[in-house]
Amino acid sequence: MDTLKYKGFIGSIEVEDDLSLYGKVLGLGSKALVTYEGMTVPELEADFHAAVDDYIEYCKEHNLPLRKSYSGTFNVRIPQQLHAQVSELAMERGESLNAYVRRALEAAVQAAQV
């Protein structure tokens, strides 16, 4: 999925049936919806930037958090066989499953930032 990035915010890019472009700012929480549109990629990007700037200003004016908060815990559903394999790898390294998965996620994030 292609995305836009601006001031630490990520926005989706979708194509309508009439080939116009639209998107929404991701990761804002369940009660916030910020959308933008354009007929060309530069128009879409400009509207995305304006939408993010407006959202930031709105949050400042109303003393609201910019992004949803994360608890630091989440459930991941994986096939039983993969669960067993990952658990075995963690045991072989002398780590808990949680520590092994956390390290794998950190490595994936670091690799994506290159």
Image: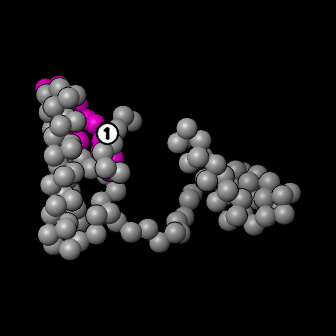
Kindly identify the residue that appears in the image at 53 percent across and 69 percent down.
Answer: 73
- What percent of the width, then of the height, locates residue 85? 76, 52
Q: Is residue 19 magenta?
A: yes
Q: Is any part of residue 98 visible from this angle? A: yes
- What percent of the width, then of the height, locates residue 66? 28, 64
- What percent of the width, then of the height, locates residue 72? 52, 69
Kindly identify the residue that appears in the image at 71 percent across and 59 percent down.
Answer: 100
Q: How many marks?
A: 1
Which image quarter: residue 95?
A: bottom right
- Secondary-structure class at tag 1: strand
Kindly identify the residue that appears in the image at 28 percent across and 69 percent down.
Answer: 65
The one nearer the camera, 37 or 113, is: 113
Q: Which residues are magenta?
A: 9-23
Q: Is any part of residue 16 visible from this angle? A: no
Kindly identify the residue that appears in the image at 56 percent across and 48 percent down.
Answer: 109
- In which quadrant will I find the C terminus? top right
- Which amino acid type corresponds to the residue marked 1 in the rendered image? Leu
Residue holding disc 1: 4
For the rendered model, the colour scheme is one colour
Q: Is residue 109 above or below residue 3?
A: below
Q: Is residue 100 magenta?
A: no
